[in-house]
């Protein structure tokens, strides 16, 4: 995957400009930068959810991409089990919810803790599967022991994992190469 003179953002408001990078086809890359620097915007552009303002990304066409958003985005009227089954079927729901240590698979999101909702959303992304796994702050709200166990279970799930993190320890847990986002002067 590579970017050629990539500018991302919103019409009239570029967030990142003239990016050029090449990431491996296999493995993991952790994008690091302060809050507000454009990590999420870059991830959404790589996933094809936000078109680039200029330039292009090569190496993503025709690839199935699973995305864990910064917000959990669980359907509030469906249990954890049914949220995950929507994308992967009942067997995948059972497998991934167990892997994410969700004990009450029939709980509605409103009855779950923030960490449980995060793990259910992660289970859904993993059940969806694909060639590229994009994780926006995947370990938000999880304690260190849980982060370590979860990272071990998802580390090699997809051929390529792209994640946005604030903590280099999270990149290390995933075996990810750290890529520091160039920061605009008004963000520093």
Image (cartoon, rainbow, N blue to C red):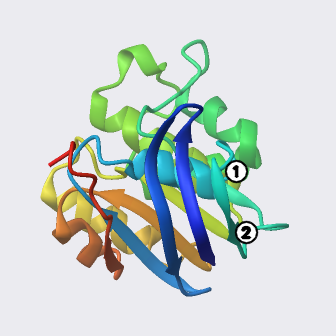
Q: Quadrant of the N terminus?
A: bottom right
Q: Residue at x 76, y 62 (%)?
A: 64
x then y, percent, for residue 87: 73, 43
x then y, percent, for residue 138: 37, 52
x then y, percent, for residue 69: 49, 41
**Spatial distance from mark 1 to mark 2, Cα to Cα?**
9 Å
Density class for disc 2 (Cα within 10 Å; few <14, some 14-19, many ≥20) is: some
Mark 1 and mark 2 lie on one chain; the one further toward the N terminus is 1
Q: Nearer the viewer, residue 176 or 98?
A: 176
Residue 48, label in figure: 1
Q: Is residue 162 visible?
A: yes
Q: Secondary structure at mark 2?
A: loop
- Res. 148 image quadrant: bottom left
Identify whether 97 is placed above or below 169. Answer: above
Q: Secondary structure at mark 1?
A: loop
Q: Residue at x 59, y 12 (%)?
A: 77
Q: Residue at x 51, y 75 (%)?
A: 20
Density class for disc 1 (Cα within 10 Å; few <14, some 14-19, many ≥20) is: some
x then y, percent, for residue 48: 70, 50
Residue 60, label in figure: 2
Q: Nearer the viewer, residue 30 or 9?
A: 9
Identify whether 3 is placed above or below 75. Answer: below
Q: Residue at x 45, y 32 (%)?
A: 72
Q: Nearer the viewer, residue 36 or 154?
A: 36
Identify whether 62 is placed above or below 140. Answer: below
- In the picture, measured across the screen, residue 12 lies left or right of residue 65, that is left
- Assess whether mark 2 and mark 1 are in contact (beta carbons under 8 angstroms): yes
């Amino acid at each position: 995957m590579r970017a050629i003179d990539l500018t991302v953002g919103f019409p009239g408001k570029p967030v990142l400009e003239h990016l050029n990078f090449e990431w491996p086809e296999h493995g993991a890359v952790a994008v690091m930068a302060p809050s507000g620097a454009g990590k999420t915007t870059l991830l959404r552009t790589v996933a094809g959810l936000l078109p680039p303002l200029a330039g292009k990304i090569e190496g993503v066409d025709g690839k199935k991409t699973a995305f864990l958003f910064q917000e959990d985005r669980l359907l509030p009227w469906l249990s954890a089990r049914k949220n995950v089954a929507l994308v992967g079927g009942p067997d995948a729901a059972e497998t991934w919810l167990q892997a994410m240590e969700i004990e009450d698979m029939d709980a509605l999101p409103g009855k779950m803790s923030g960490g449980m909702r995060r793990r259910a959303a992660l289970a859904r992304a993993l059940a969806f599967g694909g060639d590229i796994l994009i994780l926006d702050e995947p370990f938000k709200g999880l304690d260190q022991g849980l982060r370590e166990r979860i990272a071990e279970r998802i580390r090699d799930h997809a051929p390529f994992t792209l994640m946005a993190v604030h903590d280099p320890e999270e990149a290390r847990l995933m075996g990810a190469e750290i890529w520091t986002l160039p920061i605009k002067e008004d963000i520093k």
